[in-house]
Image: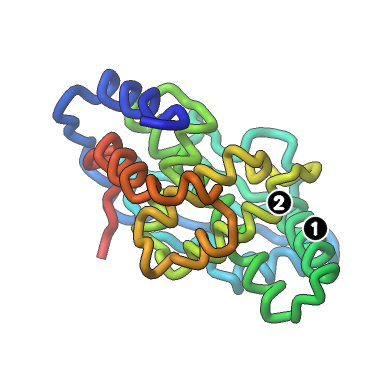
Amino acid sequence: MPHSLAALALSMVSALGAAPTPSPPAASPPAVRYEPAGSERAEQARRLLKESGSLRTKIRLPRAVEVVARDCDGRSAPWDARESRITVCYSLVDRLESTLTGISETEEADARAIGRRVEAALTAFFHHELGHALGTLEGLPDAEDQADRLAALTLATDRPEQAVAAAEARHLLAAGHAGLGHLAGEEESATFACLLYGADPARNAAIAKGGWVPAERAPSCAAEYQQAKSAAGPLIVKGP
């Protein structure tokens, strides 16, 4: 299994057993709360986040989890296992929008493309934190690469229509930009893109065509996705 996929599988198997049985899923997906903003800029970010629908999910977790969007600086970890809470700071939303707008304007992309990229980046970030929550609530050791792989699995299951845009947004941010959470890293971006491409190579062909996953790796992505999905076992539960 390439690119640390074996480590993910082993960690899941050792934590959950050879035939893992997940905890009963929560009665509903995570509840989302948008707190008031303290400035006009933060209010713009709050509206953008809420209107994008990026925090919507039908993925069920083994325990109730709250998702809170608030006016904060984002220095603390967005996933708080002790409080069972995912926090999304309006400052992060603002940085994502301004960074992707700047990148897109150099490409002379139109407003629609910019909006699509921002929404996809927010969705990718949320699913990364959902991956942290899902793993730790099932007793797995918390790790960034594990959260990233679970993020690709949950996004492919929950928001398949966002797969191509999410891979593109991660690719654009891969070089590293300050204050953008866990969306940077070229190797991490390539793995995320590979799993999303592998989930549906026909529908997500633009991921390979765009070069967001290395050409030599693309043929193995379907197998990588199936291996990751098998390793996760019944962790990924989608509600009605």
Q: Which quadrant of the figure contains the C terminus?
A: bottom left
Residue at image x 29%, y 39%?
Answer: 227
Residue 30: image location, x then y, percent: 42, 52
Residue at image x 44%, y 40%?
Answer: 149
Question: Which structural element holds mark 2?
Answer: helix
Is residue 227 among what the camera can see?
yes
From the image, tell me which residue sits under label 2.
173
Residue at image x 51%, y 67%?
Answer: 206
From the image, tell me which residue sits under label 1.
99
Characterize the local packing of mark 2: few (<14), some (14-19) or many (20 or more) Cα atoms within 10 angstroms.
many
**Between marks 2 and 1, how big is the CA–CA gap?**
8 Å
Residue 28: image location, x then y, percent: 32, 56
User: Is residue 89 rendered to the left or right of residue 63?
Assistant: right
Residue 33: image location, x then y, percent: 55, 58
Question: Which structural element holds mark 1?
Answer: helix
User: Is residue 189 rendered to the left or right of residue 15?
Assistant: right
Q: Amino acid at mark 1?
A: Thr
Q: Which badge, 2 or 1, is on the more N-terminal residue?
A: 1
Residue at image x 54%, y 32%?
Answer: 144
Residue 8: image location, x then y, percent: 38, 28
Q: Nearer the viewer, residue 200 or 151?
A: 200
Which residue occupies the extreme front position in the image? Answer: 216
Is residue 43 among what the camera can see?
no
Residue 74 lies in quadrant: top right
